[in-house]
Amino acid sequence: MRLWVSRGFIHVTSLFFPSYAIASLLTTERKHCVTMKSCALVVLLCLGYGMMTSSFRAAPPHMWRNLILTHHWPNTFCSEEHCHSTFDYWTLHGLWPDVGQECNSSWHFNVTLIQDILPDMFKSWPDLKKPTSSEFWKYEWQKHGTCAAKAESLNSQLKYFGKALELYHKLDLDGVLKRADVVPSETLYTFDQIEGALHNFYNVEPKIQCNFPKGKNMQLLGQIEICFNSEFQLEDCVHADRDNHIDNHIDFLNVKGTGLRVCEPSTPVYYPPMKGIPSM
């Protein structure tokens, strides 16, 4: 905005008001101006309103800053839900933006839009209770995908699910743990062994969640979150900001009281193999 005085007139141009609108206002008010001081007051009011308007227009759209790629261990899930898992590797739970849920209820999931990646979806992102169903993907798209889609890089169902699969394969969680000699076993691990294996390879802090069977001096390794920024670069997960995501799959399955939460650093960790929970 510019302001100057010439031949007894106060001239104003603005990025936010048409010049003719301000000129009309000032011309009308000038008839009532007894002094330049009172006319200057009118200009200041216009300036203030223009600045206030610009602050609203300049506000960026509400968008997420971070993404959470969440893996879950099928054997831990099925030990609680009494399902029979045939998956002996970490599968995808979801790709969650840190801001928003159910951002566009009119943007319905359409499985035909991800036809090209369906074989990988059934293998890497299965519904653990109904492995041939696409209902889990529908739920994840409606709750999280529609919010992730605020970014151009994820603004379609194919982009969203495809990027999740890309990051999942890039992380290779199974391979990272195996290379650190952390494998499903009847032998209990320390929490530091598991967290250290992940931190040493990815060089960021993950979020590791466990289930806590009653009467057992152990915790079951259940879920691992790895976090990314908006450029899909790895970054630390902040535990306090992520706790509200723990129950997302529980909501979908209408399961109550599974007890999944951030693992206790001092409690032994059981990484259950296919046959289930040991008697201890």
Image: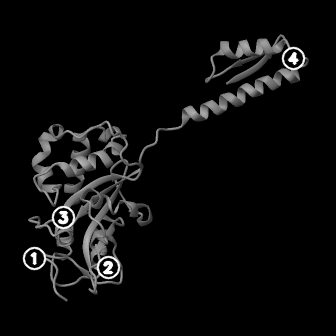
Q: Residues within 10 Å of mark 3 (few under 14, many from 20)?
A: many
What residue does disc 1 label? Answer: 275
Residue drawn at x 34%, y 45% as measured from the top left: 148
Q: Position of residue 74 (x, y in %)?
A: 17, 66
What residue does disc 3 label? Answer: 90
What residue does disc 4 label? Answer: 33
Secondary element under disc 3, as helix, strand or loop, is: loop
Res 196 → quadrant: bottom left
Give the amino acid type for the residue marked by disc 4 in the picture.
Cys
Q: Nearer the viewer, mark 3 or mark 2?
A: 3
Quarter the C terminus occupies:
bottom left
Q: Nearer the viewer, mark 2 or mark 4?
A: 4
Foreground pick, 166 / 120: 120
Report the residue that reaches farthest toward the bottom: 280
Q: Separation of disc 3 and disc 2 at Cα?
A: 19 Å
Q: Nearer the viewer, mark 1 or mark 2?
A: 1
Colour scheme: one colour
Q: Separation of disc 4 and disc 1 at Cα?
A: 89 Å
Q: Earlier in the sequence, mark 1 or mark 2?
A: 2
Residue drawn at x 29%, y 73% as measured from the top left: 210
Foreground pick, 159 / 278: 278
**Disc 4 and disc 1 in contact, CB within 8 angstroms:** no
Give the amino acid type for the residue marked by disc 1 in the picture.
Lys
Give the amino acid type for the residue marked by disc 3 in the picture.
Trp
Secondary element under disc 4, as helix, strand or loop, is: loop
Q: Earlier in the sequence, mark 4 or mark 1?
A: 4
Residue drawn at x 27%, y 75% as measured from the top left: 194
On residue 192, the disc is 2
Q: In the rendered view, would you say 171 is above or below 50?
A: below
Q: Position of residue 97 (x, y in %)?
A: 36, 51
On residue 219, the disc is none
Q: Separation of disc 1 and disc 2 at Cα?
A: 25 Å
